[in-house]
Image: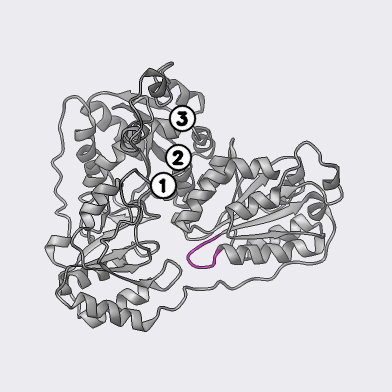
Amino acid sequence: MNAADALLKTLIKNGLEVIFANPGTSEMHLVAAIDHHPEVRPILGLFEGVVSGAADGYSRISGKAAANLLHLGPGLGNAIPNIHNAKKARTPMLNIVGDHATYHLKYNAPLTSDLDGLSNASSDWVGRSKTPDDLSLIGAEAWKQAHRFPGQISTLIVPADCAWGETKTEGPKVDFEGPQKVDERKIELAFTALKSKTKSLLFLGGEFLDEESLTLAGQIATAVGCRLATDTLTKKHRRGAGLTKVQNIPYFAEMAEEYLAGVENIIFIGSRPPVSFFAYPGKKSFLSPDKANLIEVATPEQDGKYALKALNDLCKGKKIDSSFLPSGLIDTPIGGELNVKNLGPLMASLLPEDTIISNESGTSGFIFASYIWDAKPCDWLSITGGSIGQGIPVATGAAVAAPDRPVVCLQGDGGAMYTIQALWTQAREGLNVTNIIFSNKSYAILQVELERVGALETGDRANSMLSMDNPEIDWVSLSKSLGVPAKRTVTVEEFRKAFSDGLVSEGPSLIEIIV
């Protein structure tokens, strides 16, 4: 067999089910190998940022890696923004990147680049095949490293001749490393702080925003009277009526400072002390109060679930006070003109249980998020790395991972144009994704930031770099051209029908909302 087939066989026996791909000439033997193995589902993305974003969404929901098949340095480079988001989320991901044949590299052909440099800059682990016999062995190690708890970015570089060469070697089935152990002394320190009757905050993050972790946190908070919080942007956060409400700290640094003001102890489980997204003149970067006692009980790589259980046992937590539980009551609008204020309660009231929400709606999403606590239980996926263009691809991958669950994408118009090709993939694969485009014809968050960084007074030329109204984008026509039915809604009644129809559709849909 050729080495490409050996690699696919190795990855399949280790659990590979999906490959998101945008291949080129150097990957053709890998493409052929995929054709030989119907156990793997190949999904084409028309841009590499769609490929990497979809793999991120798939992994956040399935809990295991997809593979990305990418073409040389430029292909990997195009995928890097959403690889960056996945890396910040600590999502398991395997990038398989084709390279020129080993003997061809010395000629510096037009597509030759510093592929190793790009790989090392974007990945946690990088391996390069040197012969057909080592390809599947390195592939097994790449898969193992991708699943190192809670997840890593692995990149496997495959020279073309290492893929097409013959081999008798097949890689082994590998075991994954679980979470690292927590220092028991830190659990004791955290318990001492929590029972001291000082103002304490239990700060969760990473993998520990699932229902079990939220329940444990609610019991601890009830027992000791502490507050609960999490990062501004999270990988996957279980939310909804009946679930402990763990509030995200605000995005803007001064609001986050105010939110944390007066806290004397902060106990971190699965996260680290928060910092501002950017530096601002005269404002803090490190957001915890200067005199607060910061106790990092479990890093994102450690066993935060064990830490929560141990803390709950020490606190003797058994119930959750109603103050930590959403009411489940939503004042649903009946009719009238649609706007950002009434859209939140309207959409929250219509969401079915177990909906997956991919949120990259910037300014509009912050308003909607406040209503999601009272919706039926759902999973909320955020843009953890801040590199825009994630929302639609992540929704695409999530729908591949959970075809029986409705997926809703909340997407700002600016970010949508980075990876709008993902709509075509949704249509081609028949994925049930309801895409909501918040059309304000601008990069609204940047208009806010322009003022916040203390820039000198600006005029039309600066504003033109942040606006998208000349020419206006026809979202309905654009969506239809990519195979996705679309509507523009301006009233509550129109949105209710379009959204409800989208949720039960067998394929994708798009709704444009003017904000």
Instruction: State the image coordinates of residue 237 (x, y, percent, origin top left).
Output: 34, 56
**Real-space Cα separation, disc 3 to disc 2, in angstroms:** 22 Å
Mark pair 1, 3: CA separation? 23 Å
Q: Going from the N terminus, do you reach mark 3 or mark 2 first?
A: 2
Q: Residue 146: where, in percent of width, then height?
A: 57, 62
Q: Looking at the figure, which quarter contains the C terminus?
A: top left
- Quadrant location, the N terminus: bottom right
Tell me which numbered mark, 2 or 1, is placed earlier along the sequence.
1
**Residue 150 shown in magenta:** yes
- Expressed as whole percent of the image width and height from the top left, the position of residue 57 reads 47, 50
Callout 2, which amino acid? Ile
Crowd class of label 1 (few under 14; some 14 to 19; many from 20; radius 10 Å): many
Of residues 279 and 302, the one nearer the viewer is 279
Which element carries disc 3, helix, strand or loop?
loop
Q: Which residue is mark 3?
A: 484
226 relative to 4 in the view: left or right: left
Residue tagged by mark 1?
Answer: 383
Q: CA distance from mark 2 to mark 1?
A: 8 Å
Tell me the magenta residue range. Answer: 147-152
Identify the residue under disc 2.
388
Q: Is residue 505 magenta?
A: no
Asked which secondary structure carries label 1, the reply is loop
Q: Residue at x 41, y 18 (%)?
A: 472
Instruction: Mark 1 or mark 3: name the one nearer the start of the chain.
Output: 1
Looking at the image, residue 348 lies above or below residue 197: above
